[in-house]
Amino acid sequence: MKKNLLFIFIIVLTSCKSNFTDITENRLFGTYHMNEIRDLTTAHLTYRKDYVVDRFTDLGTVCTPQYKLNMKYDTLSRYHIIINGTINFKKGKKRYTTKDIKSVTLSSISVWKLSKPRRNWKLTKDSIISPQNCPIPYDSLLAIKDVYLFVNKNLIVDIKKDAVVNCSYPITRLYKLY
């Protein structure tokens, strides 16, 4: 009888631990190689062309896919999600193009509540604030992460080495939820 109770206790404990690990294991942040980034369904993508540095147009261009995030959440509070990360290139190039993109890194997420009282949450891999303590549901944060990675995977870049630091180029994206 004791063995059966111990066995049941161990099964319950491991199942709770695996659920808890899945929630606490931070699947938001990290470096994602191009083949790990899933493609989202879209009929066609349109692109917006920007210069890497507006005043120095010869440093290169970045064409960004215009993918619309169709997500509504708490329309009265008006949340803005700001995601920071980098595009990582292969080493040893003088000019980086789309085929040189090796991976995309997601380093931080800032959640801003724009209604009164205004608040913000900054999430990183090592932050004290857990994604579960953020007002945006964790599944929604994962969906926004997927859009961020998809858009950065489909960039069309032509950047001189002078605009790239340590073979990476910083990217910040804003998503509005209202």
Image: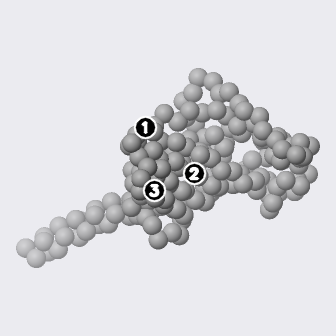
Q: Quadrant of the C terminus?
A: top left
The answer, for residue 140, to whether it is visible in the render is no
On the rendered structure, is 138 left or right of 109? Answer: left
Name the amino acid, label 2: Ile
How far separated are the C-alphas under marks 1 and 2? 16 Å
Q: Which mark is residue 41?
A: none
Q: Name the residue beneath numbered marker 3.
A: 118
On the rendered structure, is 161 left or right of 99? Answer: right
Q: Position of residue 156 (x, y in %)?
A: 76, 37
The answer, for residue 89, to whether it is visible in the render is yes
Name the amino acid, label 3: Arg
The residue positioned farthest toward the bottom in the image shown: 2
Name the N-terminal-most of marks 1 and 3: 1
Residue contact at pointers 3 and 2, CB within 8 angstroms: no
Number of the front mark, 1 or 3: 3
Q: Name the residue beneath numbered marker 1.
A: 72
Secondary structure beneath label 1: loop
Q: Name the residue beneath numbered marker 2.
A: 82
Secondary structure beneath label 2: strand
Secondary structure beneath label 3: loop
Residue contact at pointers 1 and 3, CB within 8 angstroms: no
How far separated are the C-alphas under marks 1 and 3? 19 Å
Number of the front mark, 3 or 2: 3
Q: Position of residue 106 (x, y in %)?
A: 60, 55
**Identity of the residue drawn at 54% across and 56% down:** 110
Q: Around disc 3, counting alpha carbons within 10 Å, would you say few (fewer than 14), some (14 to 19), or many (20 or more)?
A: few
Q: Quadrant of the N terminus?
A: bottom left
**Identity of the residue drawn at 55% across and 43% down:** 175
Name the amino acid, label 1: Lys
Name the N-terminal-most of marks 1 and 2: 1
